[in-house]
Amino acid sequence: MKCIRCDQQARAVCQFCGRAVCAEHIAEKRFVSGFTSKAGWWSLGANAVEVKDAVWCGLCHPEYRGTA
């Protein structure tokens, strides 16, 4: 797989769009996954799973939206 920016060998894949990026062009962005509950589905204390340094290609523009 080749980097979307420079055609070098890719090291990672963008968490948001799936584009391949090399070590030089890897960027980081906050990624929030679906919601989960710590105590089970009957609990009202649902929390999102967040990764603060997810791999990002730097080209795509993900939008964060509230669920409520």
Image (cartoon, rainbow, N blue to C red):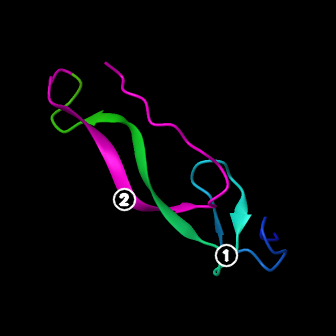
Tell me which segment is drawn in magenta: 42-68
Residue 42 is situated, as x and y percent measured from the top left of the image, at 18, 20
Label pair 1/2, CB-CB below 8 angstroms: no
Q: Residue at x 15, y 23 (%)?
A: 44
Q: Residue at x 65, y 81 (%)?
A: 24
Q: Residue at x 55, y 68 (%)?
A: 27
- Taking the magenta stretch, the answer to whether it contains residue 60 is yes
Is residue 48 left or right of 16 when viewed as pictured? left
Is residue 9 left or right of 17 when viewed as pictured? right
- Quickly name the residue at label 1: 11
Total tally of numbered discs in the picture: 2
Tag nearer the camera, 1 or 2 = 2
20 versus 49 height, above or below: below
Please tell me how crowded label 2 is: few (under 14), some (14-19), or many (20+) other residues with Cα within 10 Å: few
Task: Please tell me the numbered disc located at residue 52.
Answer: 2
Judge by depth and name the residue closer to the eye, 37 or 3.
3
Alpha carbon distance from label 1 to label 2:
19 Å
Residue 8 is situated, as x and y percent measured from the top left of the image, at 81, 80
Residue 53 is situated, as x and y percent measured from the top left of the image, at 42, 64
Q: Which kind of residue does numbered mark 1 sit on?
A: Arg
Rendered-image quadrant of the N terminus: bottom right
- Taking the magenta stretch, the answer to whether it contains residue 43 is yes
Location of residue 15 (image quadrant): bottom right
Q: Residue at x 41, y 42 (%)?
A: 33
36 versus 6 height, above or below: above
Judge by depth and name the residue closer to the eye, 33 or 57.
57
Residue 47 is situated, as x and y percent measured from the top left of the image, at 24, 37
Please tell me how crowded label 1 is: few (under 14), some (14-19), or many (20+) other residues with Cα within 10 Å: some
As helix, strand or loop, the secondary structure at mark 2 comes to strand
Q: Which kind of residue does numbered mark 2 sit on?
A: Lys
Mark found first going from the N terminus, 1 or 2: 1
Rendered-image quadrant of the C terminus: top left
